[in-house]
Amino acid sequence: IGYDGSPLLIGTRSQLPANTFDGRIDEIRIYNQYVSIEELLGISFDDETTSVIDLDESAFSVYPNPFTDRITIDSDEPNSNHIRVFLYDMLGRLVYDQDLDSDHSIQTYMLQKGLYYLQLQTEEGIYMKTMIKSR
């Protein structure tokens, strides 16, 4: 992108301001290759990457999906008392980050309805699941 003094227009091919994105953008990262959502979620803010080790999906039961005010997580993992829960919105922004509490559920009443990416991090690896908040 060259600097020419004109505004950067996002979401248009015709370069008309009326056809552009109308909102706010918190952060922009530009890559020289395709990056999947899983790779984006594994990137830390200090640009050190974390590998994703897939855990057996049968080791976790995450419900309900779609959810409303609470997500419950049951685990057969041996270290299930040491689970960190991350929840990302559709844009990859971290909206929830907590150690799993004693009743293995997280409160989600504060979230807007939409698509979310749930990441469970244990000593054995990382489990990811797409979740939908219905209301």
Image: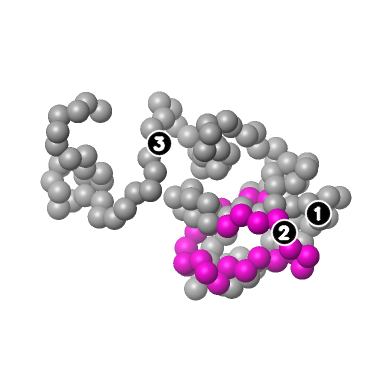
Residue 81: quadrant of the picture: bottom right
* In front: label 2 or label 1: 2
The numbered mark at residue 29 is: 3
Pointers 1 and 3 in contact (C-beta within 8 Å):
no
Residue segment shown in magenta:
96-120
Quadrant of the rendered structure where residue 50 is?
A: top right
Whether tag 2 and tag 1 are in contact, CB under 8 A, the answer is yes
Q: Is mark 2 on a helix, strand or loop?
A: loop
Indicate which disc residue 36 carries: none
Mark 3: which amino acid?
Answer: Arg
Identify the residue position indicated by label 2 in the image. 100
Q: Position of residue 45 (x, y in %)?
A: 52, 38
Q: Kindly tell me whether residue 39 is visible in this rendering.
A: no
Q: Distance between the residues labelled 2 and 1?
A: 9 Å
Q: What element carries label 3?
A: loop
Tell me: 29 left or right of 10. Answer: right
Residue sitting at 62 percent across and 69 percent down? 107
- Measured along the vertical axis of the image, is residue 109 above or below residue 27? below
User: Marks 1 and 3, Cα distance to the nearest angstrom?
Assistant: 34 Å
* Left or right: residue 37 compared with residue 18: right
Is residue 121 in view from this perspective?
A: yes
Residue of label 1: 80
